[in-house]
Amino acid sequence: MSFAKLTTKETSNMILSELIKSINLTSGKALDLGAGSLLESKFLLSVGYSVDAVDVDTVSESFSREIHDDKFKFFKTKIEDFDFKDEEYDIVVSLLTLSFISPDNFDKVFNAICGSLKRGGYTHLSFFGDRDAWAVTQQKMTFPTREKVENLLKDFKIIQFREEDKIGPTVRGDIKKWHIYNIVAQKL
């Protein structure tokens, strides 16, 4: 079953809401990578942003057809195939999706994402870390160490860096060990 379908009842991300409130920027252009059920896209639209949402899931694409706003565009593609433009976005959001990029493509794609963010722009990212249970079983995914993440963000001012290490359910109800980095950063 689609991740987007499984998460339709969730609420918008509190960290993103706090970020928007703290920077007091209620317009601009946002990029929602791995947009899923479009919760973050809808939130960003509601506070005045124009939003480009990217997801390969056909369920996400069908959800996108329910948004009737000229400031919203949906791109049905893998993140690694998206055409990133230099310094186009004021905010980039990618929650638990970047780890699905293969290790062979990860650095190149991450650099393209960072390049698409304007100087002074903000990003809210989350990754599965190297101690996540899936790091052992999912060889085609990327599970960076904290040091690697910090190095990837060397050209950013870190506003928030939360590391979670816990046991808990997946959206399907399975119990697993989670290791997640939640990051808010500003491009210098």
Image (cartoon, rainbow, N blue to C red):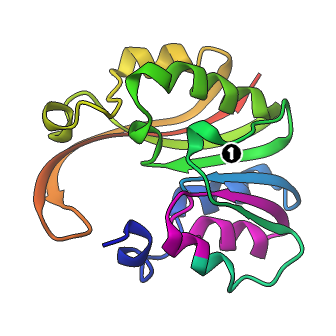
Q: Secondary structure at mark 1?
A: strand
Question: Going 35% across and 76% down the picture, which residue do you hit?
Answer: 6
Up/down of 165 relative to 36, above or below? above
- Could you tell me how many numbered marks the image carries? 1
Q: Quadrant of the C terminus?
A: top right
* Label 1 crowd (10 A; few <14 / some 14-19 / many >=20): many
Which residue is disc 1 drawn over? 92
The span shown in magenta is: 35-61
Q: Of residues 157 and 71, which is closer to you in this image?
A: 71
State which quadrant residue 148 falls in. top left
Question: Going 68% across and 45% down the picture, which residue do you hit?
Answer: 92
Question: Going 49% across and 25% down the picture, which residue do you hit?
Answer: 106
Residue 34 in percent (x, y) is at 53, 54
Q: Is residue 60 magenta?
A: yes
Q: Of residues 154 and 38, which is closer to you in this image?
A: 38
Determine whether, in the image, residue 50 is placed left or right of residue 102. Answer: right
